[in-house]
Image: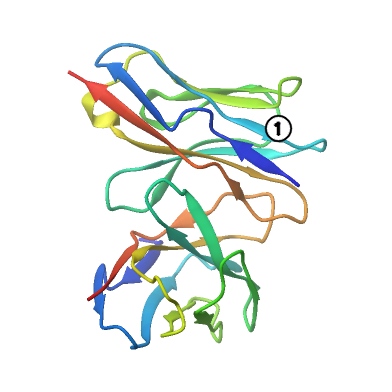
Amino acid sequence: DGGITQSPKYLFRKEGQNVTLSCEQNLNHDAMYWYRQDPGQGLRLIYYSQIVNDFQKGDIAEGYSVSREKKESFPLTVTSAQKNPTAFYLCASSIRWVNTEAFFGQGTRLTVV
Amino acid sequence: AQSVTQLDSQVPVFEEAPVELRCNYSSSVSVYLFWYVQYPNQGLQLLLKYLSGSTLVKGINGFEAEFNKSQTSFHLRKPSVHISDTAEYFCAVSRSNYQLIWGAGTKLIIKP
């Protein structure tokens, strides 16, 4: 079955540690996205990639980093510079950058302990 | 700047009653419109989309939405809700050269 796989589903991080969230898609989509979701705040765009080997900052990129070395993979690293990383993180992809719907993974819930 | 407004953060409704979730957007150009549903601790799932053509769009789970260009609205409706419809619903808009713009979400609360 085609889809987007995020792992792990739950992740705990100690303060000061970097962690990497995985996102893989087998839909052959060009565009991929990372969103952060906090209660009552909807979806906020962290980074996006229109095509392999290219990515752009979204609205809240500070404290995060990404790479897009393969079309199917778009990992997100939450660095120690992110002061409030506890949130639900959603990865999505779309066949192209604009004028189309996005498909979502099941999310990763990151908690700082 | 383009924006999407979901007018209600929460909508409580009795089971088997009809429901309307409101979405308004700001754009002077043609847009594509989407409604997504999110169940607790899950990702978002596409309910329906408007790209062109008929302004009444039917989606999954008995939902439908109507595109109103003059009022720049895309309200989501269901004639009879079920307890399983309890979820958060997001409206989103896309247009040329812009990624999806999201509303803040509306929580649908079904009362037995």
SS for dot 1: loop
Q: Position of residue B9 (x, y in %)?
A: 43, 33
Reply above or below: A56 against B72.
below
Within 10 Å of the Cα at label 1, are there few (<14), some (14-19), or many (20+) other Cα atoms? Answer: few
Report the quarter where the C terminus of chain B lies: top left
User: For residue A22, what is the image quadrant?
Assistant: bottom left
Colour setup of the view = rainbow
What residue is pinned by disc 1? B52
Left or right of residue B104: residue B55: right
Q: Position of residue A63 (x, y in %)?
A: 50, 79
Residue at left offset 42%, top offset 73%: A24
Disc 1: which chain?
A: B
Residue positioned most to the left: B112
Residue at left offset 31%, top offset 52%: B42
Left or right of residue B101: residue B17: left
Residue type pointed to by label 1: Ser
Reply above or below: A63 against B81.
below
Reply above or below: A93 against B27.
below
Q: Position of residue B35 (x, y in %)?
A: 51, 37
Residue positioned most to the right: B28
Residue at left offset 55%, top offset 76%: A62
Left or right of residue B110: residue A79: right
